[in-house]
Amino acid sequence: MHTQSTKGRYMLPDKRIIKRKLPSSHTIATWGWKEHPTITIYPIGDLHLGSIEANEEAWKEFVENISKQPDAYIVIVGDMLDNATKNSVASPFEQRYRPLEAKNILADYLKPIADKILCGVRGNHENRSVKDVDLDPLYDVFCRLNIEDRYRAGTAFLALSVGDRPIGDKGTRPMQYYNVVVTHGTGGGKQTGSGINNQHRFGNSIDGCDVLITGHTHNPAITKPAKTVFDARYPEIRVEPFVCVQCASWLEYCGYPLQKMLTPQSSWDNNTPQKIELTVTRDLKLIRATM
């Protein structure tokens, strides 16, 4: 997992692509007037396990439901642990679990669905411990699940190949490819638009990005911006869209959100969180994000 820099220090390799091959899907979904095999990715972040506002009951139900869906996967967007420390804004004396306890509980929750975790990144709440004592509690969770190769400190570049199709007597090749970029996000959380603007700016800087997933703002949003591609090789000028998903949080509207005068997040049920559906077909590359 770790690589050594020229200065002799170890770092998490954010620019190292995470490659995952997913089997052919058994789930059939309707796209327009046709049906196609489909896999579903649930972007999960801002659980803030340990906070008294965390909706842990809804989280338990979600994990149980995901474990029963053969074509469902998750990506982890950070701030899974509230991780209140003596130097944080949140008080460590107003927590449901202390940080070490919350880390162990999260690992127990994720263990039954560890094979469904495509990748994960840390958030600013986990980064508190990195800054104070050079320990990343979410990375520790991934290590305990034996999936530390799927973890990145800041941004995960996830290359998905899904399904199989025969290529004569040469074996098979993936039916379709999707490129997903996952990062915790930045910027204020009081206005949904600020998070969307940050997403669009960052997404437009990454050629080949099909889906960009962020969290942090606690304001769920789904947008589909596009960029103009000037490709002189073919030659053609084409428009390439990409999907931006801004995750909702798993916090109840009480305590800290009220204290900081944050607005309630839009109507959304933790039992049916946002989802990103990807087709598994040879000729079509379709992405549908809903909440």
Image (cartoon, rainbow, N blue to C red):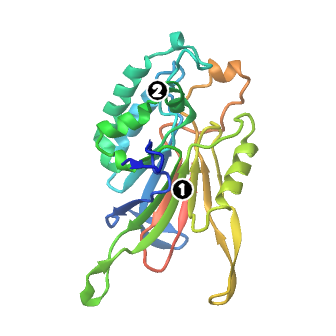
Between residue 28 and residue 86, name the one nearer to us: 86
Q: Position of residue 40 (x, y in %)?
A: 44, 56
Q: Identify the secondary structure beneath mark 2.
A: loop
Identify the image quadrant of residue 67: top left
Residue shown at 31% from the left, 49% from the top: 115
Pointer 2 residue: 49
Identify the image quadrant of residue 9: top left
Question: In the rendered image of this protein, does residue 89 appear above or below residue 182?
Answer: above
Between residue 16 and residue 3, name the one nearer to us: 3
Q: Is residue 47 left or right of residue 262?
A: left
Q: Identify the secondary structure beneath mark 1.
A: strand
Q: Position of residue 177 (x, y in %)?
A: 45, 70
Q: Is residue 280 left or right of residue 243?
A: left
Q: Position of residue 161 (x, y in %)?
A: 40, 67
Label 2 and label 1: CA atoms lie apart by: 24 Å
Would you say residue 224 is visible in this rendering? no
Residue shown at 42% from the left, 31% from the top: 137
Give the amino acid type for the residue marked by disc 1 in the picture.
Val
Would you say residue 131 is visible in this rendering? yes
Checking the image for residue 181, the label placed there is 1
Q: Position of residue 277 (x, y in %)?
A: 49, 59
Whether residues under marks 2 and 1 lie with C-beta atoms below 8 angstroms apart, the answer is: no
